[in-house]
Amino acid sequence: MTGFVALDWGTSSLRAARLDANGQVLDEHHSGDGIMHVPFGGFPAVFAAAVERWHLPPGTLCLASGMVGSRQGWIEAPYCPCPADFGAVASRVAWVPDAPGGLRVGIVPGLSTEVGGVPDVMRGEEVQIFGALRVLGVHDGAFIHPGTHSKWVRVEQDRIVSFATFMTGEFYGLLRRHSIIGRTLPPEDGPLDEAAFLRGVLHAREAGSLLHGAFSGRTLALFARLPDAALPSYLSGLVIGEELRAHQLDNSGAHPVLVGADALTRRYQLALTAHGVQSTVLGDAATWRGLAALAHILELQ
């Protein structure tokens, strides 16, 4: 493989990187051209604009992961069922017909699982988990991918065997903007107040239910037990603490790996520490490692 282009194409943003044959990043480009901002039929033009700076020869491999493979994306890449390893995911890459510039454009499929007859899905996070395995040089482990829809992932022998989704970030937004709690919060979240955040984390454990615990966001403001500026941090701690409680987190000695943006992984690491659980943090660069590993598999097929 002489090099390829990796794209992390989500709902609100697009990240593209030119990688060499060893998977090292040569150049990156970020934009706000997430799939929700692309007009109908506009994916080829947005893609061409993102990669034109690299003057790619026809046939160059370009791999895209994330919501670009959803029904609202460029083309739909059907989910790959768990358990799944690199090879299974690579075998289900969906290829874009007549891609701009004669480039070889593949869409990573994402993963699905099912518990009790109810399906669960992810798109994009699986690539970061595979990348994290390569970065850490491990084959097993528990991984947490914080976000609007957080993922808790179990890996065994390089295979993602199961995962669960928690709508933590989305519930934070709903409580902040569409509940009585939001009326007392300042317009902007502001910097993290660690003390208020951890108070929310611990109250979630004590309350035993978000339906009960969430009302504390109202009463603490009502009785002036927390300053208004600290309330967003408290609410963030409350919903993240509920996620940890609902997952039945324990301190059995397992060290989960947090994969994602610094601002969120920092909060989860604080929350885990408050529960007596140590964790490792990896940044977004795991995406490029995961796509590089998939690219190597595709080139060998």
Image: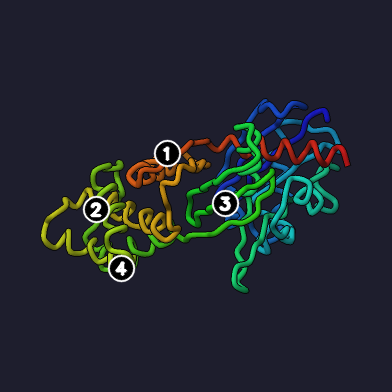
Disc 4 residue type (three-letter): Ser
Q: Do labels 2 and 1 touch, CB within 8 Å?
A: no
* Among the two numbered marks 3 and 2 on one chain, the one whose residue lies closer to the N terminus: 3
Q: Are marks 4 and 3 in contact (CB under 8 Å)?
A: no
Label 2, secondary structure: give it: helix
Q: Using the rendered view, name the quadrant where residue 25 is placed.
A: top right
Residue type pointed to by label 3: Val
Image check: 156 left or right of 213? right
Q: Badge 4 local density, few (<14 within 10 Å), some, or many (20+)?
A: few
Most foreground residue, 61 or 293: 293
What residue is pinned by disc 4? 179
| Residue sticking out furthest to the left | 223
Residue at point 81%, 48% (across, down): 99
Q: Which mark is residue 153?
A: 3
CB under 8 Å between discs 1 and 3? no
Say which element carries label 4: loop
Q: Nearer the viewer, mark 1 or mark 3?
A: 1
Q: Classify mark 3: helix, strand or loop.
A: strand
View extreme (bottom): residue: 117
Q: Nearer the viewer, mark 4 or mark 3?
A: 3
Q: Is 220 situated above or below 116? A: above
Q: Secondary structure at mark 1?
A: loop
Circles 2, 4 touching at the beta carbon (< 8 Å)? no
Identified at 39% across, 45% down, the residue is 272
Which residue is denoted by mark 1 in the rendering?
Answer: 278
In three-dimensional space, the C-alpha distance between marks 1 and 3, rounded to whole angstroms, equals 17 Å
Residue indicated by mark 2:
231
